[in-house]
Amino acid sequence: MLAGFLKRWMPQGIYGRAALILLLPVLTLQLVVSVVFIQRHFEGVTAQMTRNVLIETRYLVDRLDAAETLAAAGLAGAQLGQALQIDVLVPAPGPGADLRAFWDLSGRVVVETLQDGLPGLRNIDLVSNHREVRMVVDTAQGPVELRVPRGRVSASNPHQLLVLMISTGILMTWISFVFLRNQLRPIRRLARAADAFGKGRHVPYRVAGAAEVRQAGAAFLDMRARIERQIEQRTLMLSGVSHDLRTPLTRMKLALSMMEETEETRDMLRDVGDMQRLVDEFLSFARSDALDDMVPTDLSALVRRVIEDAARAGHTVNLETSVETGSILLRPQAVTRALENLLGNAVRYGTCAVVRLERLPHAVRLRVEDDGPGIPAARREDALKPFSRLDPARNQNHTAGVGLGLAIASDIARKHGGRLVLGDSTRLGGLRADLELAI
Ligand SMILES: Nc1ncnc2c1ncn2[C@@H]1O[C@H](COP(=O)(O)OP(=O)(O)OP(=O)(O)O)[C@@H](O)[C@H]1O
Ligand SMILES: [Mg+2]
Protein backbone atom coordinates (compact mmCIF):
# COMPACT_ATOMS: atom_id res chain seq x y z
CA MET A 1 0.00 0.00 0.00
CA LEU A 2 2.79 2.35 0.96
CA ALA A 3 4.65 1.51 -2.24
CA GLY A 4 1.55 2.29 -4.29
CA PHE A 5 1.01 5.53 -2.44
CA LEU A 6 4.64 6.58 -2.96
CA LYS A 7 4.48 5.67 -6.63
CA ARG A 8 1.39 7.81 -7.14
CA TRP A 9 2.61 10.85 -5.23
CA MET A 10 6.35 10.81 -5.94
CA PRO A 11 7.40 13.27 -8.63
CA GLN A 12 7.97 11.45 -11.94
CA GLY A 13 10.94 13.40 -13.29
CA ILE A 14 14.49 12.98 -12.07
CA TYR A 15 14.71 16.68 -11.10
CA GLY A 16 11.65 16.44 -8.89
CA ARG A 17 12.88 13.28 -7.20
CA ALA A 18 16.36 14.67 -6.65
CA ALA A 19 14.88 17.82 -5.14
CA LEU A 20 12.71 15.74 -2.84
CA ILE A 21 15.64 13.58 -1.73
CA LEU A 22 17.63 16.74 -1.11
CA LEU A 23 14.95 18.79 0.65
CA LEU A 24 13.18 16.22 2.76
CA PRO A 25 16.03 15.42 5.21
CA VAL A 26 17.06 19.09 5.50
CA LEU A 27 13.51 20.26 6.20
CA THR A 28 12.81 17.45 8.66
CA LEU A 29 16.02 18.14 10.51
CA GLN A 30 15.32 21.85 10.76
CA LEU A 31 11.78 21.28 11.87
CA VAL A 32 12.70 18.78 14.56
CA VAL A 33 15.59 20.86 15.86
CA SER A 34 13.62 24.08 15.92
CA VAL A 35 10.47 22.67 17.47
CA VAL A 36 11.91 20.27 20.00
CA PHE A 37 15.16 21.89 20.96
CA ILE A 38 14.96 25.62 20.35
CA GLN A 39 11.41 25.98 21.55
CA ARG A 40 12.17 24.27 24.86
CA HIS A 41 15.47 25.97 25.24
CA PHE A 42 14.00 29.43 24.84
CA GLU A 43 11.11 28.63 27.10
CA GLY A 44 13.53 27.61 29.85
CA VAL A 45 15.66 30.72 29.42
CA THR A 46 12.63 33.00 29.40
CA ALA A 47 11.17 31.43 32.54
CA GLN A 48 14.48 31.81 34.35
CA MET A 49 14.95 35.45 33.37
CA THR A 50 11.36 36.28 34.28
CA ARG A 51 11.80 34.71 37.70
CA ASN A 52 14.82 36.95 38.33
CA VAL A 53 12.80 40.03 37.45
CA LEU A 54 9.95 38.70 39.57
CA ILE A 55 12.13 38.72 42.71
CA GLU A 56 13.07 42.35 42.11
CA THR A 57 9.48 43.29 41.33
CA ARG A 58 8.23 41.64 44.51
CA TYR A 59 10.81 43.48 46.55
CA LEU A 60 9.80 46.75 44.86
CA VAL A 61 6.09 46.12 45.50
CA ASP A 62 6.87 45.32 49.18
CA ARG A 63 8.61 48.67 49.53
CA LEU A 64 5.72 50.48 47.89
CA ASP A 65 3.32 48.72 50.25
CA ALA A 66 5.41 49.85 53.18
CA ALA A 67 5.21 53.56 52.18
CA GLU A 68 2.80 55.60 54.23
CA THR A 69 1.42 57.98 51.64
CA LEU A 70 1.03 58.00 47.90
CA ALA A 71 3.74 60.66 47.61
CA ALA A 72 6.14 58.59 49.72
CA ALA A 73 5.38 55.55 47.55
CA GLY A 74 6.11 57.62 44.40
CA LEU A 75 9.44 58.74 45.81
CA ALA A 76 10.46 55.24 46.93
CA GLY A 77 9.36 53.85 43.58
CA ALA A 78 11.41 56.40 41.65
CA GLN A 79 14.58 55.73 43.67
CA LEU A 80 14.34 51.98 43.73
CA GLY A 81 13.06 51.78 40.19
CA GLN A 82 16.12 53.59 38.93
CA ALA A 83 18.38 51.14 40.70
CA LEU A 84 16.43 48.12 39.49
CA GLN A 85 15.81 49.45 35.93
CA ILE A 86 12.08 49.37 36.48
CA ASP A 87 9.94 52.41 35.63
CA VAL A 88 7.36 52.99 38.34
CA LEU A 89 4.28 55.10 37.56
CA VAL A 90 2.41 56.08 40.72
CA PRO A 91 -0.54 55.99 40.48
CA ALA A 92 -1.18 53.80 37.42
CA PRO A 93 -2.22 56.04 34.45
CA GLY A 94 -5.02 53.70 33.35
CA PRO A 95 -6.66 50.42 34.20
CA GLY A 96 -4.78 48.55 31.41
CA ALA A 97 -5.65 45.17 29.92
CA ASP A 98 -4.04 41.78 29.25
CA LEU A 99 -2.44 42.05 25.83
CA ARG A 100 -0.16 39.64 23.99
CA ALA A 101 0.44 39.09 20.28
CA PHE A 102 -0.44 35.52 19.23
CA TRP A 103 2.96 34.91 17.67
CA ASP A 104 4.79 36.05 20.81
CA LEU A 105 5.56 32.58 22.15
CA SER A 106 8.06 33.64 24.82
CA GLY A 107 5.50 36.26 25.96
CA ARG A 108 3.24 33.40 27.00
CA VAL A 109 5.90 32.10 29.38
CA VAL A 110 6.51 35.63 30.74
CA VAL A 111 2.80 36.13 31.46
CA GLU A 112 2.42 32.72 33.12
CA THR A 113 5.50 33.14 35.33
CA LEU A 114 4.52 36.65 36.45
CA GLN A 115 0.91 35.68 37.13
CA ASP A 116 2.05 32.76 39.26
CA GLY A 117 4.57 34.73 41.32
CA LEU A 118 3.13 38.23 41.78
CA PRO A 119 0.08 38.30 44.08
CA GLY A 120 -1.30 41.79 43.39
CA LEU A 121 -0.91 41.60 39.62
CA ARG A 122 -3.91 42.95 37.71
CA ASN A 123 -2.84 42.71 34.11
CA ILE A 124 0.17 42.48 31.79
CA ASP A 125 0.50 44.38 28.52
CA LEU A 126 3.17 43.22 26.07
CA VAL A 127 1.77 44.91 23.00
CA SER A 128 1.59 48.69 23.65
CA ASN A 129 5.36 48.82 23.52
CA HIS A 130 7.17 45.78 22.20
CA ARG A 131 10.30 46.64 24.09
CA GLU A 132 8.56 46.77 27.47
CA VAL A 133 6.52 44.61 29.84
CA ARG A 134 3.82 46.77 31.41
CA MET A 135 2.21 45.45 34.57
CA VAL A 136 -0.47 47.03 36.73
CA VAL A 137 -0.05 45.89 40.34
CA ASP A 138 -2.20 46.58 43.40
CA THR A 139 -0.35 48.12 46.38
CA ALA A 140 -1.51 49.50 49.69
CA GLN A 141 -1.61 52.95 48.05
CA GLY A 142 -3.64 51.84 45.02
CA PRO A 143 -2.70 50.45 41.62
CA VAL A 144 0.74 51.33 40.20
CA GLU A 145 2.22 50.56 36.80
CA LEU A 146 5.62 48.94 36.48
CA ARG A 147 7.51 48.95 33.19
CA VAL A 148 10.33 46.46 32.73
CA PRO A 149 12.47 46.38 29.56
CA ARG A 150 11.49 43.31 27.52
CA GLY A 151 15.15 42.35 27.15
CA ARG A 152 15.27 41.54 30.86
CA VAL A 153 12.55 38.88 30.79
CA SER A 154 13.09 37.02 27.52
CA ALA A 155 16.12 36.30 25.41
CA SER A 156 16.38 39.00 22.78
CA ASN A 157 15.71 37.94 19.18
CA PRO A 158 14.84 34.32 19.77
CA HIS A 159 13.87 34.10 16.09
CA GLN A 160 17.31 35.07 14.91
CA LEU A 161 18.53 31.51 15.13
CA LEU A 162 15.52 30.21 13.23
CA VAL A 163 15.88 32.81 10.51
CA LEU A 164 19.57 32.05 10.24
CA MET A 165 18.95 28.34 10.07
CA ILE A 166 16.24 28.59 7.44
CA SER A 167 18.08 31.07 5.25
CA THR A 168 21.29 29.03 5.40
CA GLY A 169 19.24 25.93 4.63
CA ILE A 170 17.64 27.57 1.59
CA LEU A 171 20.98 28.88 0.36
CA MET A 172 22.71 25.52 0.75
CA THR A 173 19.82 23.66 -0.88
CA TRP A 174 19.90 26.03 -3.82
CA ILE A 175 23.66 25.62 -4.23
CA SER A 176 23.45 21.84 -4.09
CA PHE A 177 20.54 21.86 -6.50
CA VAL A 178 22.58 23.84 -9.01
CA PHE A 179 25.35 21.25 -8.73
CA LEU A 180 22.89 18.42 -8.90
CA ARG A 181 21.25 19.86 -12.00
CA ASN A 182 24.57 19.85 -13.78
CA GLN A 183 24.91 16.19 -12.87
CA LEU A 184 21.39 15.34 -14.03
CA ARG A 185 21.51 17.17 -17.34
CA PRO A 186 23.60 14.51 -19.14
CA ILE A 187 21.13 11.82 -18.01
CA ARG A 188 18.26 13.84 -19.45
CA ARG A 189 20.14 14.36 -22.70
CA LEU A 190 20.84 10.65 -22.97
CA ALA A 191 17.18 9.85 -22.29
CA ARG A 192 16.10 12.33 -24.97
CA ALA A 193 18.57 10.95 -27.55
CA ALA A 194 17.50 7.36 -26.84
CA ASP A 195 13.82 8.30 -27.00
CA ALA A 196 14.32 10.10 -30.32
CA PHE A 197 16.27 7.19 -31.77
CA GLY A 198 13.45 4.86 -30.78
CA LYS A 199 11.15 7.07 -32.81
CA GLY A 200 13.45 6.97 -35.78
CA ARG A 201 15.03 10.37 -35.27
CA HIS A 202 18.72 10.96 -35.07
CA VAL A 203 19.49 13.77 -32.63
CA PRO A 204 23.08 14.80 -31.96
CA TYR A 205 24.39 13.46 -28.67
CA ARG A 206 27.74 14.01 -27.01
CA VAL A 207 29.01 11.90 -24.11
CA ALA A 208 29.20 13.97 -20.90
CA GLY A 209 28.71 13.81 -17.15
CA ALA A 210 29.76 11.40 -14.41
CA ALA A 211 31.63 8.18 -15.22
CA GLU A 212 28.54 5.95 -15.16
CA VAL A 213 26.54 8.31 -17.34
CA ARG A 214 29.42 8.55 -19.79
CA GLN A 215 29.59 4.78 -19.89
CA ALA A 216 25.89 4.49 -20.64
CA GLY A 217 26.19 7.29 -23.22
CA ALA A 218 29.11 5.64 -24.98
CA ALA A 219 27.25 2.31 -25.01
CA PHE A 220 24.22 4.06 -26.51
CA LEU A 221 26.33 5.68 -29.23
CA ASP A 222 27.94 2.32 -30.10
CA MET A 223 24.56 0.67 -30.22
CA ARG A 224 23.07 3.40 -32.37
CA ALA A 225 25.99 3.28 -34.79
CA ARG A 226 25.73 -0.51 -35.06
CA ILE A 227 22.00 -0.46 -35.69
CA GLU A 228 22.32 2.26 -38.28
CA ARG A 229 25.13 0.37 -40.01
CA GLN A 230 23.06 -2.79 -40.06
CA ILE A 231 20.04 -1.03 -41.49
CA GLU A 232 22.20 0.53 -44.14
CA GLN A 233 23.78 -2.82 -45.04
CA ARG A 234 20.43 -4.54 -45.19
CA THR A 235 19.00 -1.82 -47.40
CA LEU A 236 22.01 -1.95 -49.69
CA MET A 237 21.99 -5.71 -49.97
CA LEU A 238 18.27 -6.06 -50.51
CA SER A 239 18.08 -3.28 -53.02
CA GLY A 240 21.24 -4.54 -54.75
CA VAL A 241 19.86 -8.05 -55.15
CA SER A 242 16.43 -6.95 -56.26
CA HIS A 243 17.85 -4.41 -58.62
CA ASP A 244 20.18 -6.92 -60.21
CA LEU A 245 17.32 -9.39 -60.61
CA ARG A 246 15.26 -6.92 -62.61
CA THR A 247 17.46 -6.93 -65.69
CA PRO A 248 17.45 -10.71 -66.26
CA LEU A 249 13.75 -10.75 -65.54
CA THR A 250 13.05 -8.08 -68.14
CA ARG A 251 15.21 -10.02 -70.57
CA MET A 252 13.28 -13.22 -69.87
CA LYS A 253 9.98 -11.42 -70.34
CA LEU A 254 11.15 -10.03 -73.64
CA ALA A 255 12.40 -13.41 -74.80
CA LEU A 256 9.15 -15.08 -73.80
CA SER A 257 7.02 -12.54 -75.60
CA MET A 258 9.08 -13.08 -78.76
CA MET A 259 8.38 -16.81 -78.61
CA GLU A 260 5.38 -18.41 -80.15
CA GLU A 261 2.40 -18.00 -77.81
CA THR A 262 1.41 -21.29 -76.19
CA GLU A 263 -0.17 -22.32 -72.92
CA GLU A 264 3.29 -22.81 -71.48
CA THR A 265 4.72 -19.47 -72.47
CA ARG A 266 1.62 -17.75 -71.15
CA ASP A 267 2.10 -19.44 -67.77
CA MET A 268 5.77 -18.59 -67.75
CA LEU A 269 5.02 -15.00 -68.67
CA ARG A 270 2.60 -14.78 -65.75
CA ASP A 271 5.22 -16.25 -63.44
CA VAL A 272 7.81 -13.79 -64.63
CA GLY A 273 5.28 -11.00 -64.10
CA ASP A 274 4.71 -12.22 -60.54
CA MET A 275 8.44 -12.35 -59.92
CA GLN A 276 8.86 -8.87 -61.23
CA ARG A 277 6.17 -7.58 -58.89
CA LEU A 278 7.82 -9.43 -56.03
CA VAL A 279 11.16 -7.88 -56.82
CA ASP A 280 9.55 -4.44 -56.94
CA GLU A 281 7.96 -5.05 -53.55
CA PHE A 282 11.33 -6.17 -52.19
CA LEU A 283 12.92 -3.05 -53.49
CA SER A 284 10.39 -0.74 -51.93
CA PHE A 285 10.51 -2.68 -48.64
CA ALA A 286 14.26 -2.32 -48.55
CA ARG A 287 13.98 1.34 -49.35
CA SER A 288 11.29 2.04 -46.79
CA ASP A 289 13.98 2.88 -44.24
CA ALA A 290 15.43 5.52 -46.42
CA LEU A 291 12.00 6.61 -47.56
CA ASP A 292 11.82 10.16 -46.32
CA ASP A 293 12.63 12.49 -43.48
CA MET A 294 10.55 13.63 -40.57
CA VAL A 295 8.76 16.82 -41.61
CA PRO A 296 5.86 18.71 -40.05
CA THR A 297 2.82 17.33 -41.83
CA ASP A 298 -0.92 17.87 -41.58
CA LEU A 299 -1.96 14.29 -40.87
CA SER A 300 -5.70 14.87 -41.28
CA ALA A 301 -5.13 16.31 -44.77
CA LEU A 302 -2.86 13.38 -45.64
CA VAL A 303 -5.52 10.88 -44.54
CA ARG A 304 -8.21 12.63 -46.56
CA ARG A 305 -5.97 12.57 -49.62
CA VAL A 306 -5.24 8.84 -49.35
CA ILE A 307 -8.94 8.08 -48.91
CA GLU A 308 -9.89 10.20 -51.92
CA ASP A 309 -7.32 8.34 -54.00
CA ALA A 310 -8.72 5.00 -52.87
CA ALA A 311 -12.27 6.13 -53.63
CA ARG A 312 -11.18 7.29 -57.06
CA ALA A 313 -9.74 3.84 -57.69
CA GLY A 314 -13.26 2.48 -57.18
CA HIS A 315 -13.03 1.28 -53.58
CA THR A 316 -15.65 1.88 -50.91
CA VAL A 317 -13.66 3.72 -48.29
CA ASN A 318 -15.18 6.19 -45.85
CA LEU A 319 -13.65 8.59 -43.41
CA GLU A 320 -15.94 8.39 -40.46
CA THR A 321 -14.47 10.62 -37.81
CA SER A 322 -11.43 12.74 -37.97
CA VAL A 323 -9.79 15.14 -35.54
CA GLU A 324 -7.84 18.06 -36.92
CA THR A 325 -4.33 17.11 -35.92
CA GLY A 326 -2.60 20.18 -37.28
CA SER A 327 1.06 19.89 -38.08
CA ILE A 328 2.77 16.76 -36.71
CA LEU A 329 6.36 15.67 -37.19
CA LEU A 330 6.26 12.51 -39.32
CA ARG A 331 7.42 10.87 -42.55
CA PRO A 332 4.57 11.67 -44.93
CA GLN A 333 5.43 9.14 -47.64
CA ALA A 334 5.88 6.34 -45.14
CA VAL A 335 2.60 7.08 -43.36
CA THR A 336 0.81 7.33 -46.72
CA ARG A 337 2.22 3.95 -47.62
CA ALA A 338 1.21 2.37 -44.33
CA LEU A 339 -2.34 3.65 -44.69
CA GLU A 340 -2.50 2.53 -48.31
CA ASN A 341 -1.40 -0.94 -47.28
CA LEU A 342 -4.09 -1.17 -44.61
CA LEU A 343 -6.77 0.14 -46.97
CA GLY A 344 -5.51 -2.19 -49.69
CA ASN A 345 -5.92 -5.17 -47.37
CA ALA A 346 -9.34 -4.00 -46.22
CA VAL A 347 -10.77 -3.82 -49.74
CA ARG A 348 -8.87 -6.90 -50.89
CA TYR A 349 -10.09 -9.19 -48.11
CA GLY A 350 -13.35 -7.37 -47.48
CA THR A 351 -15.55 -5.11 -49.57
CA CYS A 352 -15.50 -1.77 -47.79
CA ALA A 353 -13.44 0.09 -45.22
CA VAL A 354 -14.07 2.73 -42.59
CA VAL A 355 -11.31 4.97 -41.34
CA ARG A 356 -11.16 6.98 -38.13
CA LEU A 357 -8.48 9.42 -37.08
CA GLU A 358 -8.39 9.86 -33.32
CA ARG A 359 -6.21 11.52 -30.80
CA LEU A 360 -4.71 9.64 -27.82
CA PRO A 361 -2.84 11.28 -24.92
CA HIS A 362 0.59 10.98 -26.54
CA ALA A 363 -0.23 9.63 -29.97
CA VAL A 364 -2.61 9.75 -32.89
CA ARG A 365 -4.47 6.64 -33.96
CA LEU A 366 -5.52 5.73 -37.48
CA ARG A 367 -8.16 3.02 -37.24
CA VAL A 368 -9.04 1.03 -40.38
CA GLU A 369 -11.97 -1.38 -40.11
CA ASP A 370 -13.36 -3.69 -42.77
CA ASP A 371 -16.10 -6.26 -43.30
CA GLY A 372 -13.83 -9.12 -44.37
CA PRO A 373 -13.15 -12.38 -42.51
CA GLY A 374 -10.72 -10.74 -40.06
CA ILE A 375 -7.66 -12.45 -38.62
CA PRO A 376 -8.03 -14.80 -35.64
CA ALA A 377 -6.23 -13.58 -32.52
CA ALA A 378 -3.70 -16.42 -32.63
CA ARG A 379 -2.60 -15.54 -36.17
CA ARG A 380 -2.22 -11.78 -35.73
CA GLU A 381 1.38 -11.90 -34.69
CA ASP A 382 2.23 -14.02 -37.73
CA ALA A 383 0.37 -11.68 -40.05
CA LEU A 384 2.69 -8.85 -39.03
CA LYS A 385 5.82 -10.77 -40.02
CA PRO A 386 7.36 -10.05 -43.43
CA PHE A 387 6.46 -12.46 -46.23
CA SER A 388 3.81 -14.17 -44.15
CA ARG A 389 0.52 -14.86 -45.88
CA LEU A 390 -2.15 -16.52 -43.86
CA ASP A 391 -4.42 -19.30 -44.83
CA PRO A 392 -3.65 -19.94 -48.52
CA ALA A 393 -7.22 -21.09 -49.11
CA ARG A 394 -8.52 -17.70 -48.17
CA ASN A 395 -6.13 -15.89 -50.47
CA GLN A 396 -6.66 -18.09 -53.50
CA ASN A 397 -9.35 -16.02 -55.10
CA HIS A 398 -7.41 -12.83 -54.80
CA THR A 399 -4.46 -11.59 -56.70
CA ALA A 400 -1.40 -12.96 -54.99
CA GLY A 401 0.17 -10.60 -52.49
CA VAL A 402 3.69 -10.85 -51.21
CA GLY A 403 2.86 -10.75 -47.51
CA LEU A 404 4.69 -7.50 -46.85
CA GLY A 405 1.83 -5.01 -46.45
CA LEU A 406 1.28 -5.39 -42.71
CA ALA A 407 5.00 -5.83 -41.98
CA ILE A 408 5.76 -2.54 -43.68
CA ALA A 409 2.91 -0.74 -41.90
CA SER A 410 4.09 -2.10 -38.55
CA ASP A 411 7.66 -1.09 -39.30
CA ILE A 412 6.56 2.43 -40.19
CA ALA A 413 4.52 2.70 -36.98
CA ARG A 414 7.55 1.63 -34.95
CA LYS A 415 9.72 4.20 -36.68
CA HIS A 416 7.26 6.81 -35.45
CA GLY A 417 7.51 5.56 -31.88
CA GLY A 418 4.17 3.80 -32.23
CA ARG A 419 2.81 0.39 -33.18
CA LEU A 420 0.32 -1.45 -35.33
CA VAL A 421 -2.34 -3.30 -33.35
CA LEU A 422 -4.72 -5.78 -34.96
CA GLY A 423 -8.13 -6.59 -33.50
CA ASP A 424 -11.73 -7.39 -34.33
CA SER A 425 -13.99 -4.79 -35.81
CA THR A 426 -17.16 -4.77 -33.72
CA ARG A 427 -18.97 -2.57 -36.22
CA LEU A 428 -18.15 -4.25 -39.52
CA GLY A 429 -17.19 -7.73 -38.35
CA GLY A 430 -13.84 -7.86 -40.09
CA LEU A 431 -10.34 -6.77 -39.18
CA ARG A 432 -9.57 -3.68 -37.15
CA ALA A 433 -6.08 -2.31 -37.71
CA ASP A 434 -4.90 0.50 -35.40
CA LEU A 435 -1.90 2.42 -36.63
CA GLU A 436 -0.62 4.45 -33.69
CA LEU A 437 1.95 7.18 -34.18
CA ALA A 438 3.62 8.95 -31.27
CA ILE A 439 3.49 12.73 -31.29
N1 LIG B 1 -8.11 -6.85 -43.67
C1 LIG B 1 -7.81 -8.15 -43.62
N2 LIG B 1 -8.76 -9.08 -43.46
C2 LIG B 1 -8.44 -10.39 -43.41
N3 LIG B 1 -7.20 -10.87 -43.50
C3 LIG B 1 -6.20 -9.99 -43.67
C4 LIG B 1 -6.43 -8.59 -43.72
N4 LIG B 1 -5.26 -7.96 -43.87
C5 LIG B 1 -4.33 -8.92 -43.93
N5 LIG B 1 -4.88 -10.14 -43.82
C6 LIG B 1 -4.14 -11.42 -43.79
O1 LIG B 1 -2.83 -11.18 -43.37
C7 LIG B 1 -1.88 -11.59 -44.35
C8 LIG B 1 -0.74 -10.63 -44.42
O2 LIG B 1 -1.15 -9.37 -44.92
P1 LIG B 1 -0.16 -8.45 -45.70
O3 LIG B 1 -0.85 -7.18 -46.03
O4 LIG B 1 1.07 -8.36 -44.87
O5 LIG B 1 0.18 -9.24 -46.99
P2 LIG B 1 -0.70 -9.44 -48.29
O6 LIG B 1 -1.86 -8.54 -48.27
O7 LIG B 1 -0.96 -10.88 -48.41
O8 LIG B 1 0.33 -9.02 -49.40
P3 LIG B 1 0.80 -7.56 -49.81
O9 LIG B 1 0.09 -6.61 -48.90
O10 LIG B 1 2.25 -7.58 -49.54
O11 LIG B 1 0.44 -7.42 -51.22
C9 LIG B 1 -2.69 -11.62 -45.62
O12 LIG B 1 -2.17 -12.61 -46.48
C10 LIG B 1 -4.07 -12.01 -45.16
O13 LIG B 1 -4.21 -13.40 -45.06
MG1 LIG C 1 -1.64 -6.50 -47.96
Image (cartoon, grey):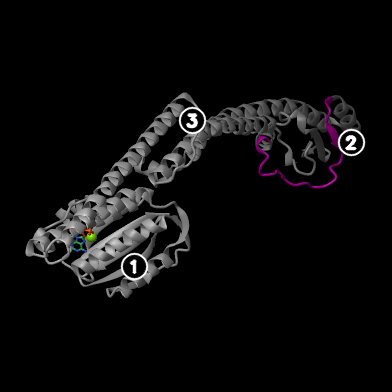
Q: Secondary structure at mark 2?
A: loop
Q: Is residue 311 left or right of residue 72?
A: left
Label 2 vs label 3, nearer the camera: 3
User: Which amino acid type is shown beneath numbered disc 1?
Assistant: Arg
Q: Secondary structure at mark 3?
A: loop
Percent from the top left, x then y, of residue 27?
55, 34
Determine crowd level at label 3: few under 14, some 14-19, many 20+ residues with C-alpha closer than 10 A. Answer: some
Q: Is residue 116 left or right of residue 300?
A: right
Report the magenta residues as a range.
Answer: 84-106
Rendered residue at 51%/31% (across/down): 25
Q: Report which residue position mark 3 lands on.
A: 207
Q: Quadrant of the C terminus?
A: bottom left
User: Which amino acid type is shown beneath numbered disc 2?
Assistant: Thr
Label 2 vs label 1, nearer the camera: 1
Q: Report which residue position mark 2 lands on.
A: 69
Q: First in sequence: mark 2 or mark 3?
A: 2
| Ligand 1 shown in quarter | bottom left
